[in-house]
Amino acid sequence: MPTNNSNSEQTAKQEMLEVRVWRGQGQGQLKPYQVPLRKNQTVLDVITEIQRLQAPDLSYRFSCRVGVCGSCAMTVNGKPRWTCRTHVSKVADEGVLTIEPLRNLPKIKDLVCDLAPFIDTWQKAGAVFKPTGTRYDAPAKVDPDSACRRAADASLQCINCAVCYSACDVVNWNKDYVGPAALNRAWTLLNDVRHDERAATLDKVFEDGGCGSCHSHGNCTRHCPIELSPSASIAGLKRTLFTGLPGK
Amino acid sequence: MTPLNKHQSYFAAIGHRFSGVLLSLFLPVHFLLLGTALEGEANFDRYLAFADNPLVKFAEWGLVILLSLHLFFGLRVLMLEFTSWPATKHLGKGENPMIRRWSSWVIPSVIASAFIGVIFLVQSF
């Protein structure tokens, strides 16, 4: 019995986190929830706890929970973040978390956005790999120390979380702008000697809504969870006006 | 949802655009007046008398401030787009040094432009 008393005292003293979650389809609103504050708690843990124990109809996306798949990006206290690797202790504002869907994308329900416009930008920017060889050819030899390979390497491993797209001021103003992720991917392809349509990709990134629309605010680089620099990739694309295709 | 555009780079980009648009409106008038001054001694004297008007001095001061802001914010863009960026992927070191450096360029640009404006006013009166 003393143990039970001790537990109930602990429960009574449990510090709570105030969480405001965007709920609704189309026109929604922030709804308040309370979640016990725990050590080493991520924002995704908080959302999952709300969904499991308080609001089973809460919609949100996640998959890997370890920062690889890029599914769980949301707006947390006004900034786009990967929620599975964002610790509550680092982002809570005086014990309050406000969680909303990503900016610059159509809302579907609660914290889920329609990512189709984001994915479409990759096609529009020519950021689609067309191999020079076939599966029957020997693997291409790429010098790891070449300038092209180094430039591509600095921009690879984007997890397609759409955080940069959501953070971008220009995407917010100009719906024709393809955004940082697509241009970053196009830059890796321009530096990939195995890509067969480098000239076509270069043409596409300079079309309306391409790299020329970037105002170098740097929000993409500032918010990228894996610290890529889409701003640097876009600067590289702009420089090709003077240098032509990289590595040629 | 609150917009994200309360950062220095945003104000630099807006300042660059805004000063550029105003310059494109202002400079043709400026050159037109200068051009008429070349049409003879009488016209030139009339231009000089016109340029001594305090309102014209004030407008020229605005032109100098706009030119200065456009120069400094334009330099920021050139440095971001034509100098090399450090690789930061997975380093966990916080904000990219290039973004940090050229964001912090904004306030000194405004101060320098104000200083240039003061020099112009001192020289003018």
Image (cartoon, coloured by chain):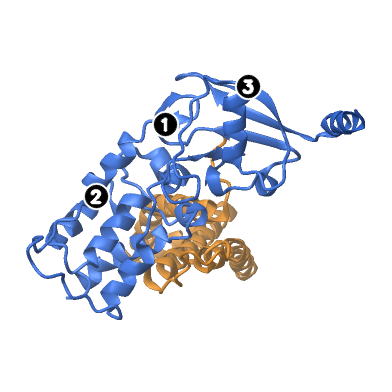
* Callout 1 secondary element: strand
In the rendered structure, the answer to whether residue A203 lies left or right of residue B98 reads left
Q: Which residue is mark 3?
A: A54
- Circle 2 marks a residue in which chain? A
Q: Which chain is in blue here?
A: A
- Determine crowd level at label 2: few under 14, some 14-19, many 20+ residues with C-alpha closer than 10 A: many
Which sits earlier in the primary sequence, circle 1 or circle 3? 3
The residue shown at (30%, 63%) is: A238
User: Which residue is nearer to you in this view: B89 or A176?
Assistant: B89
- Determine crowd level at label 3: few under 14, some 14-19, many 20+ residues with C-alpha closer than 10 A: few
Identify the residue at the far right of this view: A2
Q: Amino acid at mark 3?
A: Gln
User: Which residue is nearer to you in this view: A48 or B92?
Assistant: A48
- Circle 3 marks a residue in which chain? A
Rendering coords of residue A99 (x, y %): 58, 33
- Determine crowd level at label 1: few under 14, some 14-19, many 20+ residues with C-alpha closer than 10 A: some
Can see residue A82? Answer: no
Quarter of the image for residue A201 reads: bottom left
Quarter of the image for residue A175 reads: top left
Rendering coords of residue A144 (x, y %): 29, 78
In the rendered structure, the answer to whether residue A139 lies left or right of residue B113 reads left
